[in-house]
Image: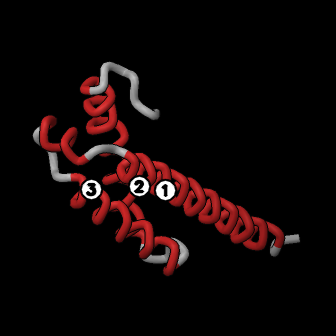
Amino acid sequence: MAYSAPIFYTTVVGYVDLLVFLLSLVLQAVALIHCLTQRGAGFQALGTLPKGAWAAIIGVCLVITVLTLGSLLIISMIGVAAALIYLLDVRPGLKDLTDGKGFW
């Protein structure tokens, strides 16, 4: 009976790791797809990094996250941070430039 807690603990940790991996993967993929579907001139008008830089940062972090299955946690978290900055800062600015008539 004393061995049930450590076994249960490792199972829960495994499921939490899988959930974090999948959420980071989806978040980075959504940010990359949105970045690739936007026009490059909008990024210059906002005064942020160019479209290629955003796509490279998010894309490289996404590829590293997929190849290492999230085991390089620092790279995965950098990718999540970059995707969140893109989605919460750059995306609304791009939407304002198109008067809300953009794809997303």
Q: Amino acid at mark 2?
A: Leu
Nearest to the observer: residue 2 or residue 6: 6
Q: Which residue is mark 3?
A: 54
Query: Decide: marks 2, 1 in contact (CB < 8 A)?
Result: yes
Element at badge 3?
helix
Measured Cα–Cα span from mark 1 to mark 3: 13 Å
Residue 91 x/y as whole percent: 33, 36
Q: Amino acid at mark 3?
A: Trp
Q: Is residue 7 above or below residue 22?
A: below
Residue 18 x/y as whole percent: 64, 64
Image quadrant holding the N terminus, namely: bottom right
Residue 16 x/y as whole percent: 63, 59
Residue 13 x/y as whole percent: 65, 65
Mark 3, other Cα within 10 Å: few <14 / some 14–19 / many ≥20: many
Measured Cα–Cα span from mark 3 to mark 2: 8 Å
94 sits to left or right of 25: left
Mark 1, other Cα within 10 Å: few <14 / some 14–19 / many ≥20: some
Q: Seen from this angle, which residue lies furthest top?
A: 99
Going from N to C along the chain, the mark reached first, 1 or 3, is 1
Residue drawn at point x = 74 percent, y = 68 percent = 11
Nearest to the observer: residue 11 or residue 101: 101
Q: Amino acid at mark 1?
A: Ala
Q: Which mark is residue 29?
A: 1
Query: Decide: marks 3, 2 in contact (CB < 8 A)?
Result: no
26 sits to left or right of 7: left
Q: Which residue is mark 2?
A: 32
Element at badge 1?
helix
